[in-house]
Image (cartoon, rainbow, N blue to C red):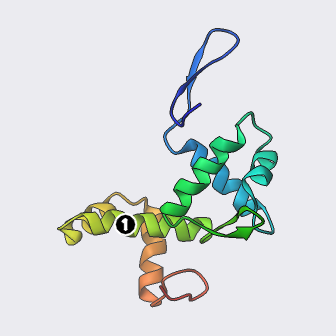
Amino acid sequence: MREGQRDESPEGRTDRRPAGGLEATVLAALWAADAPLTPGAVQLALGDDLARTTVTTILTRLHAKGTVTRARAGRGYAYSPAQDAPGLTARRMHAELDKDEDRGTALARFVSDLSPEDERLLRALLDDGQAAPGGAAP
């Protein structure tokens, strides 16, 4: 089944995977692993009915996006996440900002939509000159 494709349940109900749902599931399996995984190992980790070829396709797409890295493992590849979940979120936010010619307006609208708690956190990070908790630089 292709990502986003309909899947008919035994009860006749038609379910649809959310866009990016399979990619998120595969990434979660890679983050949970303590070593690089081959497509077959990812398939086993998911315990799902996904074909190995489907898992391989998802991993290939994630690699093309720079979301995962890969290294030769026998005749194939073993995959690892390129960064942790917060790093991936930050990367996606930067990618979206890079698409907009008016960064200032985009950032202003983003900040205006923050919850009070997120606004306090962002203000504290900016006041401390930190990019992330623990003082990590961008």
Left or right? Give the position of 86 relative to 123. right
Mark 1 = which residue?
Answer: 95
Q: Is residue 50 above or below residue 109?
A: above
Q: Answer above or below: position of 92 versus 134.
A: above
Q: Quadrant of the N terminus?
A: top right
- Which of 57/112 is in front? 57
Horizontal relation, residue 101 to residue 74: left or right? left
Q: Is residue 50 left or right of residue 6?
A: right
**Can you tell which quarter of the image residue 13 is in?**
top right
Kindly identify the amino acid type of the residue bearing the numbered disc 1. Answer: Ala
Residue under the image location 38 percent in, 70 percent down: 94
Outermost residue on the front side: it is 75
Pinpoint residue 32: horizontal percent, then vertical percent.
76, 60
Residue 5: give x, y in percent of width and height: 52, 29
> How many numbered discs, if any?
1
Give how far across and how far down residue 79 sits, in percent. Answer: 68, 64
Q: Secondary structure at mark 1?
A: helix
State the image coordinates of residue 63 (x, y, percent, origin top left). 55, 62
